[in-house]
């Protein structure tokens, strides 16, 4: 697959898509992101196919309450494929560029025959702080040490996976500083809810990603 021209981009939503009466539902910000991405490719790169799949696939709503806070759309608006992500990727005959949030459930996506770009978020220091706050006063010192050792083993496994990925998208400077060095194709982005960034960051000099 090294010389194969890739013209299929697959974005993996980290959750599920809800279906009710033939209409699909996602959080509005997710839908808008996928929609803009597809519109851009349709306007500038008509030879590309853009697909969205959910890690957990499509689930049928049990009632109107399941979709009350979600945004309705039709499958063609974002190129939605109704299969769970793993099943869909395994069924593709040609290699695709796959954009997916890294977590333990997606670590083996690098073994599916595609060029995987992982979105990475919180580095170990942030995860440890969050965990410490959530478990304060609820665990013994020995239990916390065991958890910390387990988290570090998972971290080492993640870094081995990142070295095999074709690229990394690092959410914020902390993630970029920790993980950017594990890929020649890494870029830093800022969550769309962030109101401002420091433009004098050293990371602005990072290599431009090239996934061809």
Image (cartoon, rainbow, N blue to C red):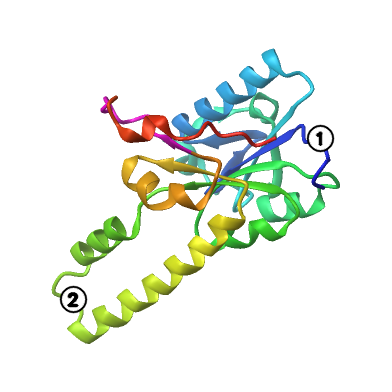
Is label 2 in a helix, a strand or a loop? loop
Q: Examine the image and state in which quarter residue 94 appears.
A: top right
Instruction: Name the disc covering residue 49, or none.
Output: none
Relative to 100, does residue 206 appear above or below in the rendering?
A: above
The C terminus appears in which quarter of the rendering?
top right
Decide which of 26, 53 is in the foreground and name it: 53
Magenta segment boundaries in residue numbering? 187-198
Q: Is residue 38 left or right of residue 29?
A: right
Q: Examine the image and state in which quarter residue 162 appears.
A: bottom right
- The image position of residue 170, as x and y in percent, is 43, 43
Is label 1 in a helix, a strand or a loop? loop
Does residue 191 appear anywhere in the picture? Answer: no
Q: Is residue 59 magenta?
A: no
Q: Which residue does the image show at 69% across and 55% down from the upper left? A: 86
User: Disc 2 designates what residue?
Assistant: 138
Decide which of 99, 83 is in the foreground and name it: 99
User: Disc 1 designates what residue?
Assistant: 5
In the image as oriented, which residue stretches furthest toward the left?
137
- The image position of residue 108, as x and y in percent, is 63, 62
Viewer-nearest of discs 2 and 1: 1
Relative to 130, does residue 202 appear above or below in the rendering?
A: above
Q: Which residue does the image show at 26% across and 83% down from the upper left? A: 143
- The image position of residue 92, as x and y in percent, is 81, 47
* Secondary structure mostly seen in the magenta stretch: loop
Q: Examine the image and state in which quarter residue 190 appears.
A: top left
Decide which of 25, 128 is in the foreground and name it: 128
Of the numbered discs 2 and 1, the one sitting upstream in the chain is: 1
Does residue 113 appear anywhere in the picture? Answer: yes
Relative to 157, does residue 5 appear above or below in the rendering?
A: above
- The image position of residue 29, as x and y in percent, is 45, 30
Q: Is residue 122 left or right of residue 117?
A: left
Q: Which residue does the image show at 31% across and 82% down from the upper left? A: 146
């Amino acid at each position: 697959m090294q010389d194969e021209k890739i013209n299929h981009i697959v974005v993996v939503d980290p959750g599920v898509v809800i279906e009710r009466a033939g209409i699909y539902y996602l959080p509005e910000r997710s839908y808008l992101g996928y929609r803009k991405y597809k519109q851009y490719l349709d306007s500038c790169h008509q030879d590309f196919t853009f697909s969205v799949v959910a890690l957990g696939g499509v689930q049928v709503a049990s009632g109107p309450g399941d979709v009350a806070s979600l945004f309705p759309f039709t499958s063609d608006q974002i190129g939605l494929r109704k299969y769970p992500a793993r099943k869909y990727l395994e069924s593709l005959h040609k290699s695709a560029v796959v954009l997916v949030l890294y977590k333990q459930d997606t670590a083996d996506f690098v073994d599916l025959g595609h060029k995987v770009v992982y979105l990475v978020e919180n580095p170990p220091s942030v995860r440890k702080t969050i965990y410490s706050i959530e478990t304060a006063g609820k665990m013994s010192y020995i239990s916390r040490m065991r958890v910390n050792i387990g988290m570090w083993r998972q971290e080492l496994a993640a870094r081995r996976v990142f070295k095999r990925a074709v690229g990394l998208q690092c959410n914020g400077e902390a993630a970029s500083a920790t993980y950017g060095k594990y890929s020649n194709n890494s870029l830093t982005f800022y969550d769309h809810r962030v109101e401002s960034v420091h433009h004098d960051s050293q990371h602005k000099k990072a290599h431009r990603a090239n996934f061809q």
